Amino acid sequence: MPERPLWRQVFDAVDRRVAGPVEAGARSDVFADALALAWRVQRRLRREAERQSARALHLLNLPAAADVRRLSRQVAALQREVRELSRERER
Amino acid sequence: MPSLAASDLRERVERDVRRALLRGRNGLRYAAGTSRAKVGQTPKDVVWRRHKAELWRYRNEAEVRFTPPVVVVHSLVSRSYVLDLHPGNSAIAFLLGQGLDVFLLDWGVADEADSGNTLETYVDEYLPAAIATACEAAGTEEVTLLGYCFGGVLALIGLARHPELPVRNLVLMATPVDFAGMSGVTALAREGRLDPDDVLDDTGNVPPEAVEGAFRLLKPTAEAAQYANLWQNLWNDAYIEGYQAMAQWTRDHVPFAGAAFRQTVEHLVRGNELVTGDLVLSGRRVDLGVITCPVLNVMAEKDHIVPLPAAEPLIRLVGSDEADELRLRAGHVGLVAGRSAAKVTLPGIADWIKADSEPTEGT
């Protein structure tokens, strides 16, 4: 068996002690609720930041990411319609 | 003997200096990102394509000695090159070397146009067409279907909804059926703490970062251990190559189509309907009991993504008389990549497939 350097032995010993409690923490109810809340808050904050930056860009008559997204949503909708039409044709 | 000890010491110092130099060189290369892993190297041809989904046929430079061909169904959330990581560590290359004709159904990278893809899109539209193409390309009437992870779920649902599909054998690897046995973010969704819509991004899909984050949460300290392994083996070129390929894969997820994700959470995770038998898709009940072909359920005992309790019940749910299990002391990825895969998993799977296959004419 290849020898393990001292630093690795120390790391493994710490890992053995820490991994269990950290994993248990990640599975706990408190963490679960915090994570779900963080996800929601992050989503809202991102939307708010985008809304504000879009307002500023629109003042300068520049397109914002939201405008590009609206366009790509329309392209995607068209793609879906084409797919649906080709499915109907195949039936 | 002092002279021996001195030579030992000198050898050790020389080795450590040599390794330190190699560590420095490899570390710089790694940090600069100049030596990216070359993944998915086995030559292949696209034999079928629909929207983002593609069916690849790998070129068998040896000889195809068994029929029917194997159609691998990959997961919806990860890159399929985990099955063909790099030369010397490729499940696909191994199966080819066993004389099998190998196809892989890759779902591609879902974007906004695919956000409306439901489970039916994959199991009713893409899967049957891909199987038909594989039969046609190989000149056979049947295939062996091999599903990995969520690809196994799709293979199961597809076969249950279409028992007429020409599938001779079904192999499922790390396939969750009892979602009550899943932990992490799946448990959050099951308990209603996480709403599927909270995870979807503006494209209507689950972003790859969320998928990656969900996997990381299952073993929060794993990344630190990986870096420790990297530092310890940074002098070893072969190790670095394998590490980079695997590290690239673990950070390289694909978006989960939003509609299919909602169905997965509602029916499979919260309702656990594969086990209860209540799964209804497009007005038709999905009964795993109608699957009667030989089934092999391959499970990894150290799998933290699909733990044993999530994969074990499969044998009881299918209607096959010949339903076998293969349990291995490996992790989720260790089933398909790495030393244990090459030594245990893949030979076991290949032997099982070959036992239920026939030699091709002329062999």
Image (cartoon, coloured by chain):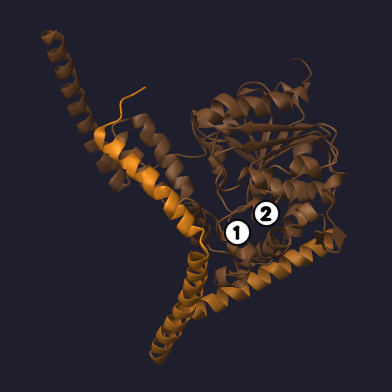
Chain colours: A orange, B brown
Q: Position of residue A81 (x, y in %)?
A: 72, 70
Q: Position of residue B345 (x, y in %)?
A: 60, 29
CA separation in Å, label 2 and label 1 = 8 Å
Q: Quadrant of residue B227?
A: top left
Q: Position of residue B196 (x, y in %)?
A: 62, 69
Image quadrant where one finds the C terminus of chain B = top right
Q: Quadrant of residue B321?
A: top right
Judge from the rendering whether residue B281 lies leftward or rightward of residue A48; answer left or right.
right
Q: Residue furthest bottom?
A: A59
Q: Nearer the viewer, residue B135 or A15?
A: A15
Q: Residue at x 18, y 18 (%)?
A: B11
Q: Quadrant of residue B238?
A: top left
Residues under numbered marks 2 and 1 in contact, where contact means CB atoms less than 8 Å apart: yes
From where the camera sits, is residue B175 visible? no
User: What residue does disc 1 label?
Assistant: B186
Q: Residue at x 70, y 51 (%)?
A: B178
